[in-house]
């Protein structure tokens, strides 16, 4: 095969792989393959999480002379390996580079399933508890020994928007780091007013007892009153596309994080949250904790009802607005895009958004 033949063949392969990738939902299945020429040779490389898609690509390449396939996937011995988010906030990116778009985040202590490691790049493709896929920098994580379900050590969850961890149990002690709401750390010991915690890095620090709760002592059941109280504490937090912490939220990240903190599992995005709720009502006068959905061709925005026509959401920043045209907080644009409201009833049902999307598997 000549160099010009390789260029033509590579272009055809790119089109074929693009058609295969288009059948899958990137949020839950990745066909991240590149086709490049090296002289008269064509090389297909990258990450594919679908065995079926990888098989289709291999079937294509096996019929072609001068084509080399280097596809990495979860069948290479990485299944069953887990990472712990070790930075205050760990971005999951669309590509394995720091300039890649952020698709979502994990806060310190969250578990991520390692799908495949990007060779020599210091990155891994991971899956969050909600099924979402993204690339993380390995230096921002630490390996978890064993299965997540076997994490039996006592843990403390951060309950304030942003909590300071200090070198000593004194308010004037130096700050080691600041952690966002819902972070989870191992408890070393408890005093009358403070928690000594171990970070995923192994470092120890102290948390004010008013800023966290021992996980096993937290309420077992979802309480809309408590959820609304926590939501109000997030007022003023900035908007950040892909954000799931008080350092920056997007609309569905705020909703998912608040409900997760109250042990209710929701998928990551507004459209899938609407599917999880199901049977949306056109009634705008709702109860506290209900979800309001907005969009035109599809749902693309979500808010939490405060009761009546008022709601809390991330739009520019976390704030309270209203669908009541007599209110000074009225949002006319959202009233015209109102899709429906619903009550969260799944209380820990399947968390994978892919379960709510046809074609999301692989």
Image (spheres, grey):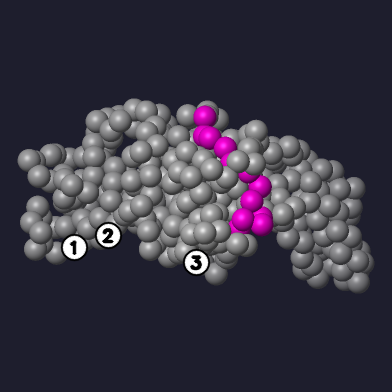
Evaluate whether residue 117 shows in this view: no
Residue at the image position 27 percent from the left and 59 percent from the top: 178
Please, what secondary structure does the residue beneath circle 2 have?
A: strand
How far apart marks 2 and 1 lie (CA) works out to 7 Å
Where is residue 72? Give x, y as percent: 65, 48
Dot 2 surroundings within 10 Å: few (below 14), some, or many (20 or more)?
few
Mark positioned earlier in the residue sequence (3 or 1): 1
Dot 3 surroundings within 10 Å: few (below 14), some, or many (20 or more)?
some
Instruction: Please give the range of residues in magenta.
Output: 334-345
* Residue under label 3: 316
Where is residue 77? Give x, y as percent: 56, 38
* Residue under label 1: 175
The N terminus sits in image quarter: bottom right
Please, what secondary structure does the residue beneath circle 1 have?
A: strand
Evaluate whether residue 296 shows in this view: yes
Please, what secondary structure does the residue beneath circle 3 have?
A: loop
Where is residue 292? Give x, y as percent: 56, 46
* Of 24 and 316, the residue lying toward us: 316
* Residue under label 2: 178
């Amino acid at each position: 095969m000549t160099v010009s033949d390789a260029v033509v063949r590579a272009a055809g392969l790119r089109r074929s792989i693009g058609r295969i990738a288009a059948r899958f939902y990137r949020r839950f299945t990745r066909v991240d393959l590149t086709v490049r020429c090296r002289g008269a040779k064509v090389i297909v490389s990258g990450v594919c999480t679908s065995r079926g898609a990888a098989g289709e690509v291999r079937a294509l390449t096996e019929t072609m002379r001068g084509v080399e396939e280097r596809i990495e996937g979860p069948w290479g011995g990485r299944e069953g390996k887990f990472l712990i988010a070790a930075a205050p906030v760990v971005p999951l990116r669309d590509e394995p580079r720091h300039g890649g778009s952020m698709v979502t985040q994990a806060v310190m202590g969250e578990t991520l399933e390692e799908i495949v490691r990007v060779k020599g790049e210091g990155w891994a493709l991971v899956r969050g508890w909600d099924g979402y896929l993204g690339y993380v920098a390995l230096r921002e994580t630490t390996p978890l020994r064993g299965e997540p379900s076997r994490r039996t050590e006592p843990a403390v969850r951060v309950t304030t928007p942003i909590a300071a961890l200090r070198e000593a149990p004194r308010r004037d002690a130096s700050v080691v780091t600041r952690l966002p709401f819902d972070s989870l750390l191992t408890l070393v010991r408890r005093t009358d007013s403070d928690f000594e915690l171990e970070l995923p890095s192994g470092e120890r620090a102290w948390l004010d007892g008013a800023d966290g709760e021992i996980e096993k002592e937290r309420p077992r059941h979802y309480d809309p009153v408590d959820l609304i109280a926590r939501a109000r504490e997030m007022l003023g937090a900035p908007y950040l596309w892909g954000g799931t912490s008080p350092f920056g939220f997007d609309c569905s990240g705020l909703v998912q994080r608040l409900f997760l903190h109250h042990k209710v599992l929701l998928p990551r995005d507004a459209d899938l949250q609407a599917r999880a709720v199901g049977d949306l009502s056109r009634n705008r006068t709702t109860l506290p904790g209900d979800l309001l959905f907005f969009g035109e061709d599809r749902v693309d925005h979500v808010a939490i009802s405060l009761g009546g026509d008022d709601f809390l959401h991330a739009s520019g920043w976390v704030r309270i607005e209203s669908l009541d045209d007599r209110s000074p907080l009225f949002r006319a644009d959202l009233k015209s895009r109102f899709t429906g409201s619903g009550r969260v009833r799944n209380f820990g049902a399947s968390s994978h958004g892919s379960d709510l999307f046809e074609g999301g598997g692989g």
